[in-house]
């Protein structure tokens, strides 16, 4: 059962997923590793795109597909140097944001595995 997909959108809801993404992006601007990777003028756009992607990917409305098409995550992240340090920091900030929200231990563990797999997949250095 550990590898089965959980209906995270149904279990946590849009409000919690939105709060997780907001918590992550609250940490990014001052982070010495991730901050420089995010153009300050597009911080709100980056937050909206991640929120929309996660809501779609976790079983919510497919607004991301309508607005952006196929995720093409590796292509979209190719301009950024995503090395082990960036991957690990992204996870650190994301898990800190998740820990601020009311997610049961199995749901948090699922999010950590899922997001960790994606973060590793996006490494390009």
Image (tube, helix red, strand yellow):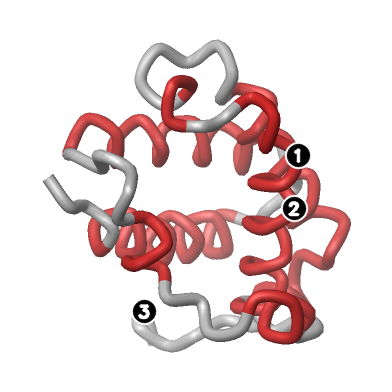
Residue 101, image x, y percentages: 73, 42
Residue 14, image x, y percentages: 84, 64
In the image, taking residue 103 as reference, residue 95 lies left or right, namely left
Occupied quadrant, residue 13: bottom right
Occupied quadrant, residue 90: top left
For residue 44, the mark is: 1
The residue beneath circle 2 is 48
Q: Nearer the viewer, mark 1 or mark 3?
A: 1
Eyeballing the image, is 31 above or below 110? Answer: above
Q: Are marks 1 and 3 in contact (CB under 8 Å)?
A: no
Secondary structure beneath label 1: helix
Residue 116, image x, y percentages: 34, 55
In the image, taking residue 38 as reference, residue 36 lies left or right, namely left
Eyeballing the image, is 62 above or below 16? Answer: below
Along the polypeptide, which appears first: circle 1 or circle 3? 3
Q: Nearer the viewer, mark 2 or mark 3?
A: 2
Q: In front: 16, or 55?
A: 55
Along the polypeptide, which appears first: circle 2 or circle 3? 3
Eyeballing the image, is 14 above or below 42? Answer: below
Q: Are marks 1 and 2 in contact (CB under 8 Å)?
A: yes
For residue 80, the mark is: none
């Amino acid at each position: 059962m550990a590898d089965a997909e959980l209906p995270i959108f149904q279990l946590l809801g849009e409000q919690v997923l939105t709060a997780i993404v907001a918590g992550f992006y609250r940490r990014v601007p001052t982070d010495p590793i991730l901050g420089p990777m995010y153009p300050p003028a597009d911080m709100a756009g980056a937050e909206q795109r991640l929120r929309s992607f996660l809501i779609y990917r976790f079983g919510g409305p497919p607004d991301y597909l309508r607005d952006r098409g196929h995720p093409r995550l590796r292509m979209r992240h190719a301009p950024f140097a995503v090395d082990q340090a960036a991957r690990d920091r992204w996870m650190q900030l994301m898990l800190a944001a998740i820990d601020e929200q009311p997610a049961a231990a199995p749901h948090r563990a699922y999010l950590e595995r899922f997001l960790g797999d994606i973060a590793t997949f996006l490494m390009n250095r």
